[in-house]
Image (cartoon, helix red, strand yellow):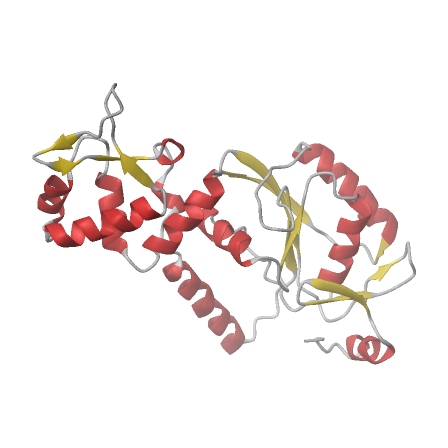
Amino acid sequence: MELQELISRGRFIFSNAPKCLEVFTLINGKRNSKEIAVKTRRKLSAILNDVKKMKDMDLIRPRTDANRKIVKKEDCVIYEKVPLLRHISLIYFQDITKGQQEIARKERTAKKHKRSQIQLLRIPAVSELLDICRHGEDHIYEFKGPRAETAKITKEIAAFLHTRHGGLIFYGIDDDGSIVGSDLRRQSFDQALQNSIRNTVLPRPNIAIKEIDVLGRKVLTVIVPPWDRKNIYQYTKEQRVYIRRGSNVFVATPEELKKLGRGEYID
């Protein structure tokens, strides 16, 4: 089983059960459930219930000795984390609800004060990116696997440039959300993409490319700014204007071009 799948299972269990996450942190191949119950000041039955959930999800397993016999202490099975999870930081399992609430608060504040400056999307934390991969692409997030054509990425950028929030393109994540990592160094990817944009998108936009480490793999993130409600960006390679709806890119219709010309968002 892949590490990404195990982390997704853990987040599913722990998202609404912080006490279960606490039990997970205390499982180390030495403590039994009774000792964990004492440390957490919870009933043994509750601990056993949490342990069963984690065992059913293959996050933990009974510890065995050299003869492959299950190790017990005081007639209570001792569990250990599966090898892939033994050295994983808890940040991968942490709840991001507070972070999402903070983002929503900032968005409300920005709307209230009618800020005119362009706000770039921020790079998501690792735990947030895992959730993004699980939920899939949408109107803000786009996945591109290794060896994706530079021209296709440029077209995605041309479409994102007409959106209310801009977008993030993750190079190194397959369409199904699997984190496979980039096959290019950031400098090489940046050079190729910037040249493509310079040659095929008018007026020329400013985009940024950042490298992030996720599960030991490098993912290159293209940050596309929100639409400035002034410029209409043309993908000159095809002499067309593109827009993004959901996770898809479309050629702008005459009516949509009129809306863009009036500075109106195409929702």
101 and 137: which one is in front? 137
Q: Is residue 226 left or right of residue 85?
A: right
Residue 23 seen in render = yes
- Quarter of the figure with the C terminus: bottom right
The answer to whether 248 is drawn above or below residue 52 in the figure is below
Q: Residue at x 28, y 57 (%)?
A: 17
Residue 97: % across, % down? 38, 61
Residue 161 seen in render = no
Q: Residue at x 65, y 50 (%)?
A: 175
Residue 252: % across, % down? 82, 71
Q: Residue at x 56, y 75 (%)?
A: 114
**Residue 79: quadrant of the picture:** top left
Q: Is residue 199 left or right of residue 248?
A: right
Q: Is residue 110 left or right of residue 176?
A: left
Q: Residue at x 72, y 75 (%)?
A: 266
The answer to whether 126 is drawn above or below residue 29 in the figure is below
Residue 58: % across, % down? 36, 42
**Residue 30: quadrant of the picture:** top left
239 and 204: which one is in front? 239
Q: Is residue 251 left or right of residue 14?
A: right
Residue 122: % across, % down? 54, 54
199 and 64: which one is in front? 64
**Residue 211: quadrant of the picture:** top right
**What is the count of numbered marks?**
0
